[in-house]
Amino acid sequence: MSMKAEKITGSAPEIAITAALEAVMLLADEPVTPQVLATVVGVPAEQVEQICTALATEYESQGRGFVLARVAGGYRYQTAPSADVYVERFVRDGHSGRLSAAALETLAVVAYKQPISRQQVAEIRGVNVDGVLRTLQRRGYVDEVARLDGPGQAVLYGTTAQFLEHLGLDSLDELPALGEFVPDSDMVEALERRLRLIPSDSSSEISQSSAERQDQADLGEAVAD
């Protein structure tokens, strides 16, 4: 069943409510409740449920490889049961694939800072790491090891036995010390000189140049006299 695009009124430019809901649910890594979705798009929760039900029916009728499922009181995208054999094949074969640079950087952060939350990893790397962490978890290199105390109880991640096996390590104590990868003080100083201007030095150079120009002007006047 094809559905007409609903519009969010009062927005500039206007965004289809259906498209907005799809975007939010695609980004989320956990089921999103109708109440949260309603707050995001600015319509009643009942309307959100109607749209999501229509979307789920539309996807199913089109034979898509994904479905919009109602899970744990919310909605999320997941692979269609009819595609399970191909998904399993992809996940199994994907273990031999090479990790991207982003995945390797994230894995290094987890390895050296574990146990660590998703938010803490994101703050260190300066980018969203949700997808990368899911990839690492699917590959078996990281897993949930604990939860933070306090509100929210964020999941903490750590490396697995498979991570140690692939690196040929007996324990995390055998990881190379971070100091081996940090440049020495002379290198840091050289980099600073190349990459930034020191205000005090710049000011002194400007003052010196001004004084030289003044001396040349005075000399010129003396010669003229």
Image (spheres, helix red, strand yellow):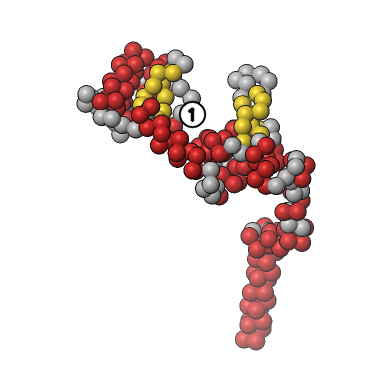
What amino acid type should be assigned to the residue bearing mark 1?
Asp
64 sits left or right of 79 in the view: left
Question: Looking at the image, can residue 110 be seen?
Answer: no
Q: Nearer the viewer, residue 140 or 188?
A: 140
Q: Percent position (x, y) of residue 204?
A: 70, 64
Q: Nearer the viewer, residue 43 or 102?
A: 102
6 sits left or right of 35 in the view: left
Q: What residue is rendered at 34% in x and 32% in y?
A: 65
Q: Percent position (x, y) of residue 193?
A: 68, 62
Residue 138, located in which quarter of the rendered image? top right
Q: What residue is rendered at 66% in x and 28% in y?
A: 145
31 sits left or right of 121 in the view: left
In the image, farthest residue toward the top = 46
Q: What residue is rendered at 62% in x and 36% in y?
A: 142
Q: Percent position (x, y) of residue 116?
A: 66, 33
Residue identifier under label 1: 29
39 sits left or right of 153 in the view: left
Q: What residue is rendered at 65% in x and 23% in y?
A: 147
